[in-house]
Image (cartoon, rainbow, N blue to C red):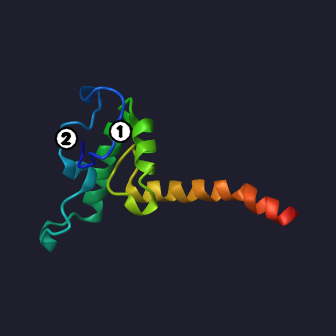
Amino acid sequence: MLGHNDFTLSGSEETRLCVGTDPELWFGPDDDVTPELRESHAERNVRENAAKQLCADCPFTAQCLEQELWHGITEQWGVRGGMTASERQHLLRHRRAADLRPVAAERAVA
């Protein structure tokens, strides 16, 4: 699935909307293409929004997102679980900060 075969989601392959789509929709063109073939910022936005729309219509979006977040902040690529890599990185940072708040509060009281 989409170049990420190191995890599985419950549910049949046929019900996940990403199955059978072009990986370039999710990850963009290869980095080693010539400059004239690289996507512009506008093209990237259109591509990412199209991928996100497929995710929005998929019953496995939340499960896919949680699976992708297990890869950690430095291993985020492409659109997965309805979010871009940078959006997932932001979410991971936010979750990490939220997890640390109780510890910081305990230290302040001690």
Which of the numbered marks, if any, corresponds to residue 106?
Answer: none
Residue flagged by tag 1: what amino acid is it? Answer: Cys
Left or right of 18? Residue 62 is right
Nearest to N terminus: mark 1 or mark 2: 2
* Residue 7 in picture, x, y percent from top left: 33, 42
The picture quadrant where one finds residue 101 is bottom right
Left or right of 104? Residue 52 is left
Give the position of the C terminus as an image quadrant: bottom right
Instruction: Say what secondary structure mark 2 lies in.
Output: loop
* Residue 43 in picture, x, y percent from top left: 25, 58
The picture quadrant where one finds residue 71 is bottom left
Left or right of 72? Residue 102 is right
Residue flagged by tag 2: what amino acid is it? Answer: Thr
Left or right of 7? Residue 103 is right
Which of the numbered marks, if any, corresponds to residue 21?
Answer: 2
* Rendered residue at 83%/65% (across/down): 108
Considering depth in this image, is 90 or 104 the residue closer to the camera? Answer: 104
How much space separates mark 1 and mark 2, taking CA atoms?
12 Å
* Residues marked 1 and 2 touching at CB (< 8 Å): no
* Residue 85 in picture, x, y percent from top left: 39, 57
Residue 84 versus residue 13 in the image, above or below: below
Residue 59 versus residue 20 in the image, above or below: above
Considering depth in this image, is 43 or 5 the residue closer to the camera? Answer: 5
Mark 1 crowdedness (10 Å alpha carbons): few <14, some 14-19, many ≥20: many
Q: Which residue is mark 1?
A: 55
* Rendered residue at 40%/48% (across/down): 68
Instruction: Say what secondary structure mark 1 lies in.
Output: helix
Mark 2 crowdedness (10 Å alpha carbons): few <14, some 14-19, many ≥20: few
